[in-house]
Every structure is written in structure tokens, then in C-alpha cells.
Amino acid sequence: MLSRSELVRRLLDHESGFAITPIIDTESQIAEASVDLRLGPDFIVAKRATGLSTFDPAQVDDIGERIRDYQDYMRRPVGSAFYLHPGQFALARTLEYFTLPREISAEVVGRSSWGRLGLVIATAPLVQPGFKGTVTLELSNLGTVPMVLYVGVRIAQATFYEVTR
Amino acid sequence: MSKSLPVLTGLEAKVFEAALHRVDTLQNELERLGNEYSDREDLPGNRIVLRALGLIVGESRREIVREGRRLAERDRTESVDNGFLRSIGSRTQTLDSLVHDYMPRATRTPGREVETLVRPLTRLVNTIFTDRELIFDPADGYEIILSSVQEPLTVYARYFSHNVWEAIKALPHVTVISYPALSQDDALQHLLLGHEIGHLVLSKEVSLDGGNADKVKLETLVFNLAFSEGIARLQQESPVKLSSADRRELHFRLQSIFRELASDILGVRLMGPAYAIALADYEAVRNRWAHGGVSQTHPGLAWRLRTVISEARRFLDVDRETAPWVSARAALTELEQMIPEDLETMSDAERAIIDRSLALLDERLDQEIGDAQLLVGELERLFDPVWDKLMHSIPPAEEIFRRSRPDVPQPPFPASVGNRARDILRTGLRGGRRPVADDIEPPNPWSQPIDWRVVLNAAAFCWAANALPYEGTNTEHLPIDPRRSAQRRELNELVRGTIELAETHLRLQEVKDELDDMNFVR
């Protein structure tokens, strides 16, 4: 696992091929062995299923269409609120863009402060070496009261690992 | 119908109900759009038009109800009141025209592809003007046009009431920039919006002595001065005296051409040297390359390209010999070699008038657009690192202080960063070893967002110089690599994402403390 100083060293080296952008405050965002990630502005919200019975991977022909029928896209400006109701599921993305070189992988998990309230951040946390892009977050409120999430708030954390070859 | 509304019968009731229904439908539609746009940060101009329309429609409704009440209270033995019918008719007719002319301004919204550019472009305009909002209007045709909303709307408002007129006049000014909807996702083409902002700058009200008295448009001020000097010379040299009609026509024609060339120059100053690349691309699509593009109102393409290339060289002729700079200069030279034949039939004396007016404009530009210009030094400092990141598909959204790259001029570090870097080196060297990871503490501040125009410029030159690395199979047997189109799409996606990240960085700097306080459990 990469330590804070190793993360900083690689981020400062333009030839490392390692980038997390934007980072606006290293003091609070880069911890001893992780980087805090902020909630991005885009959301795909799962609609309440009324006429839709199942997602059946066996019916591969129309599953993409069915998934789109079942989702709504929305965008919220930085600092604005997004309400996640109990039992609701939404896809979001990190605000930070990652570029991982071939020798580094990452794992994205929720921050404990939000986890204690019942927020699940990611169900598929592994980010493969060589990945470029923002990381998708699978948000779900397992608590019993609605949760207000603000775009830009530090919601998840990533740890980074050297991949041996 | 509500109890507070007047009770009418017969034809009058029908006219009254129909008019009211029309106004209510319009009011509901405006309300619906208002709700729909409530979280669209990229539609401030559209929201202002909605507000203005709402004021006018609200006043129309009040007037229609007032007319109805007047009619309900009159002597019932009288026949149908033609004055009433005319009054209601004229109200709804005016509303019809208003809806026809201005609802598209409120309803025709840009795709979310343009969203990332709305904030920085609006910020750029507001560096020059105060209280100005933009509407980005995806138009059907392949053209970019500038138009104003405020003035004609206030003219409409005059038909209603003084209060409405005053309320609309007090709203921020709204300017519409129409651009080809087909190239909505082509951020590199949006460099050309600098030309339209240039037109806006030329329409700025200024005075010779800097005071408030006798204000005229900037373009009128400089052009008239050059024209009056030049026309005297022209008359001396010419055996034929110009009639006043000829003189007016010449004034109109030369001023139109001056306006376009000046807007091109302003486009380069505001957006950077890649404006020249964008202009060449745009005109190629419009087939101007083949017939020269000469018209009564626009200078020929050759003249325009020569002007913008010369202006662009101001940015590129700096003492930098790295690969990105060499490639960018080569791309500009290549473009210069492709300039079509100059088909302009203008005399030397006429050209001299335009040259003089451009020179007069140049003298005033620092004063008129000051901080809005892209600084040559800013491009010089950031061009290499931005280019470098684009080559590696890393979005160059932030300038990271103390990021190591030996061949790039160092950013202006805050003193604390410089001292810390020196300490690290000293500690390491004193111990007879290179600084290792444990010595490295992140610089504070860590980074700052990169100017969106530098990103656009580096991307456009990367594209023009064909510098981006290709992936996949080789198709050298084709005259133009078919992967270029896909590559442009990908580059545009990276550029839009980069500008979005840089804008988010900027916004986060403002609200960071507020957001970080929400991390209630440490």
C-alpha cells in the first residue's frame, strides 16, 4: 500500500503517469495511506420499478434498454444537495479524475463517518491498473431516514497498491 | 372560472375566456420551464428571459381582467363593445408576437456538452461588462451570430405598463450567441465564440475623454476617426468627387469590414492563438476556401487569415524551443501557406482606412478589455505542461506547484513552497543522498486551476500539428487517416472534462470549508 509521502512523490513526478485531479487541499484530502474523494455532480437514479419485473442476464438482447428505462440522469451544481432516501439506489461518480499507471491499482471504499449513518458507497471497489477516468460510486442508503449529500463533499477514500509483475 | 373574475355573456364572454385561457396557458408554461431550469447553472440568460416574459404575461392578465370588469359593470342594454374586443385582441396579438419572437430564447437550450464552457465564457464577458448574461442558442444553420434580447423586450414592455418596462430594464443584459447546433460537442470550434464576444466589445459605449458625456460605440469612435482622415486623402487623390450617397455607402462597407477584422483580432486576444486554427476549420466547412469569402460585409478569407495569423504570432514568437512550441509554430506556418488567393477588390486608400482604424483600436484595447485578454506569459508558462498531459490523456485541469519537469519554466511559487523545496534539497544533500519520499511534504498550496483557454489552445495546436499519439492499426494507404475523426471526438471529450474539472476546482476553492465541515466524524 502506498504511503502519504509516496503518493505525494508520485503525484509531483510528471513522468510517473499517476494523477488524481483536482486536489485542492492536500492537508485534509491526503491521509497517511489514502486519498479522500469528493462526490461528483452527476447522478443516475434508479426509478421505483412499477412495470418492470426483473433484470435477467439471460435476456441479453434488451437488457441495456431495460436498464435505461429504469434510470433517470440528473446533474447538480457543486455545493447543492442530493437527497438519498432509505432503500434508494443511485449511481454517482467521484469528482476526481484518476490516471493510474500500469503498476498501480486502487481500492475505493466509503468513509467511516458516512458508513455509520448507513451509506454504502461502493460495491465493486477495485480499480484496475492503467485505469483512466472518474470512479463510479454505487450509493445506497441502508439507514431509516433520508440522507442529504452535497456535491463536492468528501464521501469516499481510495487506497493505492503497487502491482508486482 | 374564479369568483373574482367578471361575469360576461355572449361573444364578450367567449373572447374574454379565450384570452384568459391563452394567458394562463402561457403562464403555466413559463412556470414549468422555470422549475425545469432551476438547477441548470448553464442557463442564467434563459432564466432572465423567462422572468421578463413572466412580467409581461402577468401584466397582460391583469389588463385583460381589468377590461373584463369594466365591461361587466357597464350598462347591459348596450350592444357588443367593439372597443373591448379591440383592446383584448391587441393584447393577445402582442403576446403572440412576443411568444413567437422570444419563447425560443427561453426554450431552445444548449446541450449539456456546452455546459462546461458557459461559466468561463460568461465570466470572461463579465470581466469586460458588468451585469451581462449569455444565452447559448443552438441554431439550425452553420453560423455564429450575436443578438441582444434586452432592448427589443423593453420595447414590447412599453405596450404594457411603465412599471413592467422599468422592471425589465432593471434586469441584467442578456446577449444571445447562436452557434451551429451540429458542432455542439466540438469545444475546439468554440474558440470562435471569441469573435462574437469581440463584436460585443466593439459595441461597448465609450467616450473620447473617458468621462460620461457623449458616449458612442467603441467601433464608431475609432472607425469614424480613421474614416474622416482617410476620406480626405482619398478625395485628394481621386479625380472624381464622391457624392454624399457614395460616401455613406463607402462608410457602411468599410465599417462592416473593419468590424469583422477587429472582432477577429479581439477573438485572438481573448481566446488565444488557436483562434486562427478554429477559423480555418470553420471556413473550410463553409466552403469559403474555394470562393474567397468576399462579400459587402465581410472581408475575404485571405485577409482574415493573414490578420489572425499575424495576431497569433504575438503569442507564439517567444523564446521557447520545446517540441510543443515548435509544433505549434509549424502548424501556423502550414496554415499561412494554405491561405487562398486574395480576391478583395478594395483600393489601397480604402485598405489604409481600415488599417488605420485597426491601429486606433489597438491603442485602446488594453483599456477596454484589460484583464480579459489571455496573457502571452500565461500561455508561455502553461503551454508545455498542458500539452504534455494531453499527450498522456491526463486532464490538465490544475497546475500543481513544484511538479517536477526540468524543461518548463517554474510557476510563480508562493514563498512558503520555494523555501520548503530548498529545505528538502539541503537536508538531502547534507546527508549525501538524494531526497527520498519520506522528505516530501506536499506543497501548500498544492495547485491552482489552469486557465481554460490554455487548455483549448494546447488541444487545438495538438490537433493541428497532428501530434496526438494514434492507437490501433495503421492505415497509411488512405489520404487522410479515418481515425482522425474519432480522435477529435476523444480529444474534445478530454478537453470538456478538463475544463469542467478546472471550473469545479475554482468553485470548490470557494465552498471547500463549508463542505469540509460536513465531515462531522473525523
Image (spheres, grey):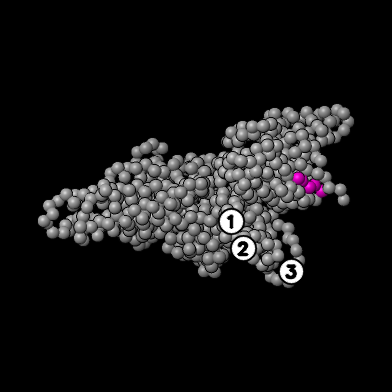
**Mark drawn on residue A49:** 1
Q: Please name the predominant secondary structure of the magenta segment in the image.
A: strand
Label 3 with label 1: CB-CB less than 8 Å: no
Circle nearer the viewer, 3 or 1: 1
Which chain letter goes with mark 3? B
Residue A163 spot, x, y in % from top left? 83, 47
Q: Residues within 10 Å of mark 1 (few under 14, many from 20)?
A: few
Q: Which residues are magenta?
A: A103-107
Distance of label 2 from label 3 (alpha carbons): 38 Å
* Point 32% across, 48% down: residue: B58
Residue A132 spot, x, y in % from top left? 72, 51
Q: Are marks 2 and 3 on the same chain?
A: no
Which secondary structure lies at badge 2?
A: helix
Circle nearer the viewer, 2 or 1: 1
**Mark drawn on residue A65:** 2
Q: Is residue B83 visible?
A: yes
Which chain letter goes with mark 1? A
